[in-house]
Amino acid sequence: MDRTAKVYVAGHRGMVGSAIVRALQAAGHTQVIVRTSAELDLRDGAAVRAFYAHERPTYVIMAAARVGGIHHNSSAPYDFLYDNLMMAANVIDGARHAGVQKLLFLGSSCIYPKFALQPIQEAALLTGPLEVTNEAYAVAKIAGIKLCTFARQQYGCDFISAMPCNLYGQGDNFSLQNSHVLPALIRKMHEAKLRGDAQLMLWGTGTPLREFLHADDVASACLLLMDRYAEAGHINIGSGEELSIRALAEKVATIVGFAGQLEFDPALPDGTPRKLMDVARIKSLGWSPRIGLDEGIRGVYAWYLQHGTDARK
C-alpha cells in the first residue's frame, strides 16, 4: 500500500478496527480516515456513497460489525442479520462505485458449517448447515464474502476477504450481555474474585474447542494481505492452535487470581463443538502470529483493570 494514500478503516472504535489503525500508523501511513457510527451510519447507503464521494479513499478495510456472544446472537437474530448485511453491502458497493483500488472485508470463522472437517479449510464454506446460535451473523458475513468475490468476477475490483478465528485484545467488549467468551470470563472471574466467591458457574459443558488470536496479530495479517493477497474467495487468519473452554477458563482464573471452583451448566448452549482454522495459505504468504495466549490474556486483563467496562459497555 502507498503510505501517503488515504486508507479508510470502517469500525475504528472496535477492538479489531482500532488495532488496524494502530498498525497502519506504526507502518507510516499518514492518511488514515475514520468515522464514528454517529458521524456515518454504515446502514445508510446514501450517507456511505456521500462519504466516498467526499473522501475518495484509495484503500478500504471493513472491520465494522455488530457483534456479540451466543445469547445476544440468539435473542436478536434479525438485528444481527440486517445490520451486518446492510453495512457490508453499503461499504462494498460504495467502494465499487467510488473506484477504490483495494478493499479488505473482515468476517469470522462462524461462517463455516457447524460440523466442518477440522482444521477448517477455506473450501469448507457452504458445505453444510451453520451453527444456529450465530446463523444470522454468519449469513451476513457470507454475503459480504460473495459480494467481494462477485465484484472481482464481474467488475474486476481488487476486493478481498479474510476470516479470522476468535479474536481478543485491548478495547474488547466486556459487557455481560453481549460479549464473547474470553472477555466475559475475564470480567466474571475478576468480579467473583472481588466478591470472594467460592465458585463460579459458566455456560455449557466446557468441552467445545476454540482457537484464539490477538487483535494486534490480526491487524498485522490485514496489512500483509493488503500488500500480498489478490485472489477471489476468502482466506483464513488464525493461530492454528486450540484449547477447550474449560482449559481457557482455568487459564483465565490463574491469570486473574480467582481461586474458586469452576462449574459448568450443561443446560446452557455450547455453540459449535470445534472451530480450528487451517491457516496454511496465510502462513505461505509469510505471516505468523507473535502474541501467545498467556501473554495476550495478561495484557487484556491489565487493560481491563485500567479501563474497566467504561470504554465499551
Image: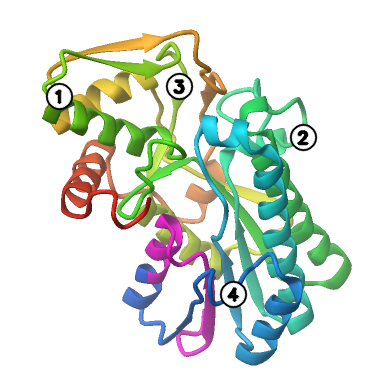
Looking at the image, do the residues carrying marks 2 and 1 touch, with CB atoms under 8 Å apart? no
Which residue is under mark 3?
209
**For mark 1, what is the residue?**
258
| Residue in view at x 73 percent, y 59 percent | 86
Mark 4, residue position: 40
Query: Residues under labels 4 and 2: Cα distance?
Result: 32 Å
* Above-or-below relation of 74 to 221: above
Instruction: Give the labeled residue for mark 2.
Output: 126
How is the structure coloured here?
rainbow
Query: What type is the residue that disc 2 sits on?
Result: Leu
Q: Which residues are magenta?
A: 1-21
Mark 3 or mark 4, which is nearer the start of the sequence? 4
Within-10-Å neighbours for mark 1: few <14, some 14–19, many 20+:
many
User: What element does badge 2 sit on?
Assistant: loop
266 relative to 78 in the view: left or right: left
Q: Which is more toward the observer, 104 or 303?
A: 303
The first of marks 3 and 2 along the sequence is 2
As for residue 12 lying within the magenta part, the answer is yes
- Total marks in image: 4
Circle 3: residue type: Leu
Q: Residue drawn at (19%, 42%), measured in percent from left and top?
A: 298
Q: Amino acid at mark 4?
A: Leu
The reply, left or right, for residue 219 in relation to residue 120 is left
What's the CA distance linking mark 3 and mark 1? 22 Å
- Closer to viewer: mark 1 or mark 4: 4
- Whether residue 277 appears in this view of the structure is no
